[in-house]
Image: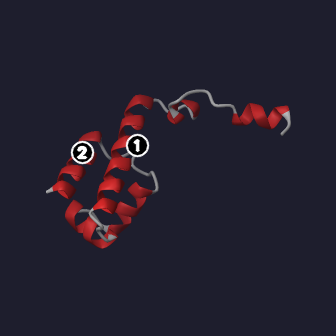
Amino acid sequence: MNAEIENILEITSSNVYQGIEVNDTSEMQRKSQIVQDLIKLINAKQLSPEAAAELLEIDLANLYRIKRGQFREISETQLLEMIQKINS
């Protein structure tokens, strides 16, 4: 690998959001962990995507967006409430 590519790939932090210059890096890292926990919980309970979306009271498209990492507009509180709904 040449030096130019190595510089591009250089890891700058343990927080991936700092590397891409997101303003709310700590919050995004916490939300990312919550989403990971949510997905693990859904999988552990062997819920279909449809059943999970129904329990979460969101449409299936939103569940898929969250799973793809598109959760910037969802608050930390909302994500934590989702975990509680799956645990209920």
Residue at the far front: name it. 44
Q: Earlier in the sequence, mark 1 or mark 2?
A: 1
How crowded pointer 2 is (Cα within 10 Å; few <14, some 14-19, many 20+) is rated as some
Q: Which residue corresponds to the image point at 40% horizontal and 29% vertical from the top-left?
A: 26
Judge left or right: residue 80 versus residue 63. Answer: left
Q: Which residue corresponds to the image point at 44% horizontal and 52% vertical from the top-left?
A: 70
Residue 53: percent from the left, percent from the top?
A: 27, 66
- Which of the 4 image quadrants contains residue 45? bottom left
Which label was assigned to residue 6?
none
Judge left or right: residue 14 versus residue 2. Answer: left
> What's the image's color scheme?
secondary structure
Residue 49: percent from the left, percent from the top?
A: 33, 69
Residue 13: percent from the left, percent from the top?
A: 56, 27
Q: Amino acid at mark 2?
A: Leu
Which label was assigned to residue 80?
2
Residue 66: percent from the left, percent from the top?
A: 39, 55
Q: Is residue 23 above or below residue 88?
A: above
Q: Which residue corresponds to the image point at 32% horizontal and 47% vertical from the top-left?
A: 74
- The foreground one among 18 and 13 is 13
Q: Is residue 48 above or below residue 23?
A: below
How crowded pointer 1 is (Cα within 10 Å; few <14, some 14-19, many 20+) is rated as many
- Which of the 4 image quadrants contains residue 50? bottom left
Judge left or right: residue 39 versus residue 78. Answer: right
Which element carries disc 2, helix, strand or loop? helix
Which label was assigned to residue 32?
1
